[in-house]
Amino acid sequence: MPTEPLRNELLTWEDVDVLIDVLLGQLREAGPFDALVMITRGGIIPGGMICEALDIQDVLTAAVRFTPGLDNEPLAAWPQFLQFPHDKLLEGRRTLIVDDVWGSGRTNTAVQGRVKAAGGQPASCVLHFNPYRSLFNKARPDYFAATTDAWIVYPWETDRGIDHIPSGPVGQN
């Protein structure tokens, strides 16, 4: 059962640069990727940084929403794909899926499932992996820069003011 984060961790752009460098080392060692799928909204900035550094030309987006299921249970919800690349853009392609954080893991595993169903070979990549909140015993990101038990606040989230940062796990998928 996921636990509540014990603390907030506010990152700087320099912190993000270090995390991206860690990921780039792993990704370069893993070999080239044919496409990159950024999960909105959290994966847009790290995904853009990674595709630039690795010269990945085919950059796609996936938008996923989980609405509460029966008895208003949010964790039992099925994903609703608001936006997703056409199967032909993924078929037979080694595809890197990028998000900022793996919290519950629901969003990332849903996107991986769709890429796989389209005939692609998905690999997941996040800045932070929170194994303490993950709903999956065996699933985890293929590439991650850091492990955490904190609620991570990225520098692109602070311009909206710290009052808008959620205090619980609602925003961390």
Image (tube, rainbow, N blue to C red):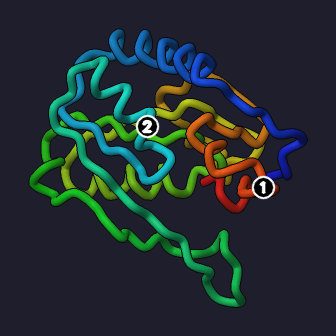
Query: Considering the numbered disc 1 on the image, is that residue within a helix, a strand or a loop?
Result: helix
List the residue tagged with mark 2: 45
Image quadrant in which the C terminus is located: bottom right
Quick check: 81 above or below 92? below
The residue at the far left in this view is 88
Picture coordinates of residue 164, whole percent (x, y): 72, 57
What's the residue at 90%, 41% (across, down)? Answer: 6
Identify the residue at horizontal 22%, vertical 57% (top origin). Answer: 85
Disc on res. 113 = none
Query: Relative to the observer, which residue lies in front, 119 or 40?
Result: 40
> Which of the 4 image quarters holds residue 169?
bottom right
Amino acid type assigned to the residue bearing label 2 in the image: Ile
**Place of residue 140 in the rendered image (x, y in percent of width and height, measured from the top left):** 56, 38
- Number of other residues with Cα within 10 Å of mark 2, as a class: few under 14, some 14 to 19, many 20 or more: some
Three-letter code, disc 1: Asp
Residue pictured at 39% horizontal, 61% vertical: 63
- Asked whether the beta carbons under mark 2 and mark 1 sit within 8 Å of each other, the answer is no
Q: Which residue is mark 1?
A: 163
Label 1 neighbourhood size at 10 Å, few (<14), some (14-19), many (20+)? Answer: few
Left or right side of 95 for 10? right
Above or below, 33 against 137 in this view is above
- Image location (x, y in percent) of residue 122: 32, 40
State which tag comes first along the sequence, 2 or 1. 2
Q: Residue furthest right?
A: 6
**Which quarter of the rendering shows the N terminus?**
bottom right
* SS at badge 2: helix
- In this rendered view, identify the residue nearer to me: 170 or 103: 170
Horizontal and vertical percent position of residue 2:
79, 53
